[in-house]
Amino acid sequence: MSNDLLSNLSNTPVAKQLGLPTVPRLRRFEPGQALLSGPVLVTSVGDGRFAKPISALVEENGQRVVTAERSESRTSIDTAGEEKLNAAVLDLTGATTLADLAAAREILTPAVKKLGPSGRVLLLGAEPGEASGAEAAAVAQSLDGFVRSIGKELRFGATANLLIVSGDAAPSAVDSSVRFFLSSRSAYVDGQNVHVGAPVGPTLDPAGMDDPHDPDLPLRGRVAVVTGAARGIGAAIADTLARDGATIVAVDIPAAGEGLAKTANRTGGTALQLDITADDAPARLISHLEQRHGGVDLVVHNAGITRDKLLANMTEDRWNSVLAVNLGAQLKINAALLESSVLNEAARIVCVSSQSGIAGNRGQTNYAASKAGVIGMVRALAPKFAERGATINAVAPGFIETEMTGHMPIGTREAGRRVNSLKQGGLPVDVAETIGWLGQAESGGVNGQVVRVCGQSMLGA
Amino acid sequence: MPASTRRAAVIGGNRIPFARANGAYSRASNLDMLTATLDGLVARFGLSGERLGEVVAGAVLKHSRDFNLTREAVLGSRLDPATAAYDVQQACGTGLQAAIAVANKIALGQIESGVAGGVDTASDAPIALHDDLRRVLVRLNAAKSPVDRLKLVGQLRPGQIVPEIPQNSEPRTGLSMGEHAARTALEWGIGRAEQDELTAASHQHLAAAYDRGFFDDLVTPYLKLTKDNNLRADSSVEKLGKLKPVFGKGPDATMTAGNSTPLTDGSALVLLGSDEWAAEHRLPVLAHVVDSETAAVDYVHGPDGLLTAPVYAVPRMLARNGLTLQDFDLYEIHEAFASTVLATQKAWEDAAFAKERLGLDAPLGPIDITKLNVAGSSLAAGHPFAATGGRIVATLAKLLRERATEENKDQRGLISICAAGGQGVVAILEAKA
């Protein structure tokens, strides 16, 4: 567990007597855990095409679908007695007028009152760019502000997120994203919007894949490379992907080999000691994947270093080493992957960016530049990977409780972990779960996106 | 028994960085190091939970509690506990002899895969009780009555407290290995300069191999050590020339702490298998084990030097395979001492020695020293006795594979390891293009 004393004290009588603010305990995924923990409100405003399949998903997972009863005077939600809602899902892809928006408000007002701990508000909206007319575009865009504000108001670990769906995306395209955002896997992803389009590459035949809806093994049969896997967030990524069924190729610099071997053996994978900044690193990685696995399904560019100094004191060495590991190596490996034949069908690339790259951070000009660069790279390469039936996305962790943050001065650390809607730092597994979702073959509709794993941090928002 | 045999494949290896004794690994036991090395190998080749044919390893300096050292390492590792294991010990030949044992079973089709190597610690050395004290204690344990026990207690003497510390010396001559090597060096007229040159080359070759990432898939760091800490990348003949001789006497003494291997802690293993097993596991075949030979010399009463048995083993193996000493693309001659490597070469080049001692019409002739120990050897890496064979087999197999791929031509390599007790183990590896 983390060294977050406030969080650890939070649910004790002592904390109540002292009047300490409460830190919600987030529900997190464990193997065998049901997707949903209570009834789910599913409804649409306007002509939505998602309410029906999502209702089916809820029922498939053993929970009751609740609908909103709208009358002249009020909207009521019928949950039996005091029963709390696990989630409220609103399909607003057909909402085009202010009246539609008002209807959405009408439904959500009673819904948030009924939302239980670690509850979920998930809105599906249209692409503002695809809207016909200014009002429709305005309504589609308004959902962004709407959902962000809901996120800030929700309590007890509940989150609010928005899927912005293109008109050509079939309901199956959003399936893996809906599952992720409803489940406890998205515990620390809050206030985010994610664009979902028609899946890249050839249409996947779910019957031809290894039971894609096995909720415990969504990555079964997939080979996943994780760089920087010896410890910290990288080790958690390897553990989580392996838990979800992936075969792990754990990569780290040769000097980190001891921890790397532990990660590899813990996950039943293999260790590849490789300095990713070496000129021949992309070739060595690719030939290793070809020889040992015949291809790769998921590459997680997680390896990163910090060499903090104020810009006034920044040296060439500190700048270059951070840019080389955090950005240069990713650029070179991605270019080599695109040129090679090693990418399997439905390959996924996930790059680890950072909140620093979005918000900036004092003393981290080099780090923030590299992590912002990752975002630029992901957006530029998304169409290129799409041509190969692959996707590339970024995750941007906020304050994550790691060995590194454990060494921060207590003031900085306390400030860092409280300035978000969930009032706590995230865990490495939260980053890993997000990568796991983006890494699924079924997530082909998500490409070129940057998903923050930050509990809706106020920094850079 | 099968009608035909096959050649065992060297698939890869793993070792921990070698550490000078009483340093980085001073608190690690043989079991700790061997288990870590095995786990590193398991991680590299994805063998977690796998049942291998067998694991064979050993240690030269061994505590009595480590009687089942290799089996204990397997049980502590990520391998399937149903993987059988046994210990071997042939002094510095242990690692290579273990590899030969596993390779032969694979060749016969008795097993499909195996791990071989060894470990040694000169830091955590076994210290034994004085023999007199031990005898009294054994009888005390067996005594039946209090009176008997009291009588035995009366036999205890203060002098018995002095323990027996393992010596790096031959029981039958009382001479240290270095003194024996110094005799051989004198006999063959091995000069100081050539020893220092060989030593500097070993350091430079090892450093260059590290720099080009050669050891990225051969070494796994251990206890925060990431490279062999005996390695001096800036070693030079000038620097080595300043050291005082430590073995031999008088003006003829040439052997220094620089051109002799230091006491070292470390562990090394190789993964062997049939071609079929390797293919099933999508693992590379670096090279094959072609043949091996073990020789022994009478260094106690006869004219031969303690570390000269490989001089005899190699011609026997060459004759059996219809090869000459020049038919090799790479040579790995274990650098127990720089002088040993040089004396071995001189013996092979000497016509009289060939005729009188080897019973050959002509000497084996010289080797191209640009093909010798090209990724460094024991003088630079250090020499944890039983670990050296595993280090050399994995290193040579990878070197041969690299060259076979680059030149698109079969490559053949010779391994020669001298051992205490007047023994020597040699082997041929071959990599197909």
Image (tube, coloured by chain):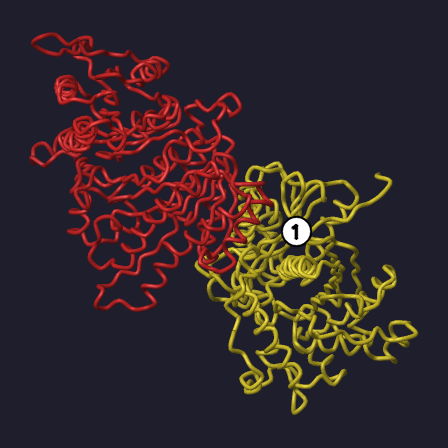
Chain colours: A red, B yellow
Q: Which residue is at 65% across, 81% downward?
A: B195
Give the residue type that dot 1 points to.
Ala
Please, is residue A54 above or below residue B323 in the view? above
Which corner quadrant holds the C terminus of chain B?
bottom right
* Residue A246 vs residue A412, the one in the foreground: A246
In percent of width and height, residue B236 lies at: 55, 81
Seen at 20% across and 38% down, the residue is A456
Q: Name which quarter of the figure residue A160 lies in.
A: top left
- Nearest to the observer: residue B407 or residue B128: B407
Mark 1: few/some/many CA within 10 Å (<14, 14-19, 20+): many
The correct choice, above or below, for B44 with respect to A133 in the image is below
Is A57 placed above or below B185 here? above
Vertical position of residue A199 compared to residue B375: above or below:
above
Tell which of B295 and A151 is nearer to you: A151
Write down the residue under mark 1.
Answer: B116
Residue A291 at x, y percent in the picture: 60, 45
The chain carrying label 1 is: B
Q: Is residue A137 visible?
A: yes
